[in-house]
Amino acid sequence: VIGDRAYRRENERFRRAGRALSDARDAQVRADTVDALAERFRADPPPGGWWALRALLGAGSTPNEKDLEGVRERAAIEIVAGEEAIESWPLDADGFRLVRPGLKRAYSRARRSYRKARAKPGDEALHEFRKRSKDLWYQLRLVRRAWPAVIEATAEEAHELSDLLGDDHDLVVLLAEKPKRFVKRLQRYWKTSAP
């Protein structure tokens, strides 16, 4: 509804904010996932123990408060700029006509990603399905007042689905860290420990 140019600009703005937070989130997820596994399989630890697994996966240390504060500040700057930009969005519709295109697009994309994940399951397909489920959840939140009992239940289903798919993604991040991210993480360790 706001047009492709404005959409791309705002989408990139919020993606930058998300990327700023993702490394810290992934580090926390790795640590939390190992902790959950350690609790669940307390009697059957991996070779070397849970601390060895944490170290191997880079889950031994999570970002400190000072690092997190800088990450939060950078993300907040992007989010505030995005919030201020809303006033200049070229909206030429109102009511349901305003949300209809986004709702239809989100639902269509979620269905497509579901079919792709069923046809060829894998980490990427499930991650894409999660993102599209989350998009649908956001869209449903916009229209939930139309019939709260029904739409809120549907929104909760979409949210629960995205959470479950997110758990899968967290395990993928834990077990299959990409080389670029692995090297970037080690570089941060190097810089942190340098005198």
Image (cartoon, rainbow, N blue to C red):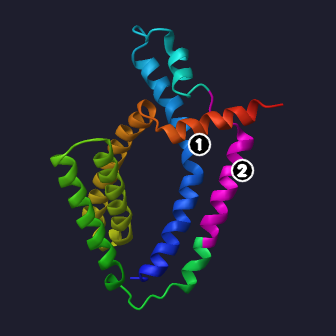
Q: Give the residue furthest to the left.
A: 119
Q: Position of residue 15 (x, y in %)?
A: 51, 61
Q: Nearer the viewer, residue 86 or 191?
A: 191
Q: Is residue 28 above or below residue 89?
A: above
Q: Is residue 129 left or right of residue 80?
A: left
**Main secondary structure type of the part rendered in magenta:** helix
Q: Position of residue 47 (x, y in %)?
A: 45, 9
Residue that mark 1 sits on:
24
Q: Is residue 63 magenta?
A: yes
Q: Is residue 10 above or below residue 120?
A: below
Cα distance in 3D space between marks 1 and 2:
11 Å
Picture residue at 20% right of the left edge, 53% below the top: 116
The quadrant in which the N terminus is found is bottom left
Secondary element type, mark 1:
helix
Q: Nearer the viewer, residue 143 or 110?
A: 110
- The earlier-in-sequence mark between 1 and 2 is 1
Please report contact status of discs 1 and 2: CB closer than 8 Å, yes or no: no
Residue that mark 2 sits on:
70
- Image: magenta residue range: 61-81
Picture residue at 28% right of the left edge, 52% below the top: 157
The quadrant in which the C terminus is found is top right
